[in-house]
């Protein structure tokens, strides 16, 4: 029974550590669409599974289902989005 309890504690500690890591990654940029480090959101360039945040259809990074979906976005260096074929505003111009 002790080994089972230790395994559960280890798994729980891993989940907590993962959550704290995600929270740190999300706070590295501000929530007004302007991330730190001279980057900008670029819509329509994320490859499947490589988006940086959620959309109306899912809530997490890395859940894009298809390449270059117009509502999926990635952070890119400021001034490079349109050169990559992306857009600076989401579909519908929100």
Image (spheres, rainbow, N blue to C red):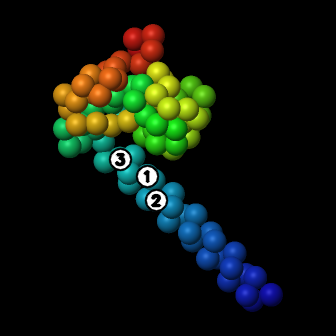
Q: Tell me if mark 1 has few (under 14), some (14-19) or many (20+) residues whose alpha carbon lies within 10 angstroms of its own.
A: few
Tags 2 and 1 touching, CB below 8 Å: yes
| Disc sitting over residue 20 in the figure | 2
Question: To which residue does mark 3 refer?
Answer: 27
Q: Tell me if mark 3 has few (under 14), some (14-19) or many (20+) residues whose alpha carbon lies within 10 angstroms of its own.
A: few
Q: Quadrant of the N terminus?
A: bottom right
Q: Give me the residue at 43% from left, 52% from top.
A: 23
Tags 2 and 3 touching, CB below 8 Å: no
Question: Disc 2 and disc 1: Cα gap in Å?
Answer: 5 Å
Quick check: 3 above or below 27? below
> Which percent across, then down, holds residue 55?
52, 29
> Which percent across, then down, holds residue 43?
39, 25
Q: Give me the residue at 73% from left, 81% from top.
A: 5
Question: Disc 2 and disc 3: Cα gap in Å?
Answer: 11 Å
Question: To which residue does mark 1 refer?
Answer: 23
Tags 3 and 1 touching, CB below 8 Å: yes
Q: Which is nearer the N-term, disc 2 or disc 3? A: 2
Q: Quadrant of the C terminus?
A: top left
């Amino acid at each position: 029974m002790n080994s089972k309890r230790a395994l559960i504690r280890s798994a729980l500690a891993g989940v907590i550590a993962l959550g704290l890591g995600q929270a740190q990654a999300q706070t590295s940029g501000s929530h007004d669409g302007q991330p730190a480090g001279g980057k900008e959101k670029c819509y329509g360039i994320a490859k499947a599974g490589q988006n940086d945040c959620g959309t109306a259809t899912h809530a997490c990074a890395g859940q894009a289902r298809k390449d270059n979906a117009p509502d999926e976005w990635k952070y890119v260096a400021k001034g490079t989005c349109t050169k990559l074929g992306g857009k600076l505003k989401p579909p519908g111009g929100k």
